[in-house]
Amino acid sequence: MFGNRTLFLCELKSHNGKSIPFNCVRENQIEQLTKAAQFPFIVPALVIFFPDVERCFAIHILDWNNLVDASKKKSANIAEIAQAGFEVGVTKLKVNYRYDIAKMMKDLGGQK
């Protein structure tokens, strides 16, 4: 996504339950997003949707890396992800969901 002179590189994940195993994000995805973080006009992030609880979070890749490094577990629960990232507004339509992308871009973009 491109907005306000900033490129948002997002890896989208959807995971059932109330936590996501760290191995759900492939190593090459983490490496490439981490490399992209060195550029001031790029905001690399993971966008994780939990359909069971209908909640979605955006977390900057550097914050994700800190979360993984600091954790002694093999997964992160919703509370940990919410603390490290930002909640993305979700509205359930008849079948699909609508995400508040404008707020997500504002929250992630202000984090630099």
Image (spheres, helix red, strand yellow):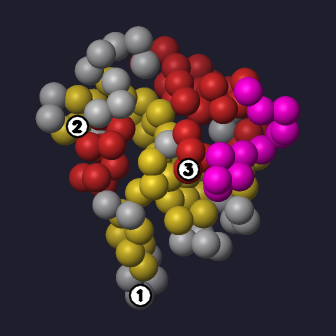
The residue positioned 59% from the left and 57% from the top of the image is 14
Q: Quadrant of residue 111?
A: top left
Task: Point out the stretch of residues depicted in magenta.
Answer: 70-80
Q: Identify the residue position indicated by label 3 in the image.
A: 82
Task: Report how far apart the C-alphas of labels 1 and 2 lie in the structure.
Answer: 28 Å
Crowd rating for badge 2 (residues with CA inside 10 Å; few <14, some 14–19, many 20+): few
Residue 6 drawn at (x, y percent): 23, 29
Residue 57 drawn at (x, y percent): 50, 52
Q: Amino acid at mark 3?
A: Ala
Q: Is residue 89 left or right of residue 70?
A: left
Q: Earlier in the sequence, mark 2 or mark 3?
A: 2
The residue positioned 26% from the left and 43% from the top of the image is 106
Asked if the residue at tag 1 contacts the one at tag 3, i.e. Cβ–Cβ closer than 8 Å, the answer is no
Instruction: Confirm whether residue 29 shows in the render.
Output: no
Task: Report how far apart the C-alphas of labels 2 and 3 lie in the structure.
Answer: 24 Å
Q: Which quarter of the rendered picture does the N terminus lie within?
A: top left
Q: Earlier in the sequence, mark 1 or mark 2?
A: 2
Crowd rating for badge 1 (residues with CA inside 10 Å; few <14, some 14–19, many 20+): few
Q: Earlier in the sequence, mark 3 or mark 1?
A: 3
Q: Identify the residue position indicated by label 2 in the image.
A: 2
Q: Which quarter of the rendered picture does the C terminus lie within?
A: top left
The residue positioned 71% from the left and 30% from the top of the image is 68
Q: Identify the residue position indicated by label 1 in the image.
A: 94
Secondary structure of the residue carrying tag 2 is strand
Looking at the rendered image, the disc whose residue lies closer to the viewer, 2 or 3, is: 3
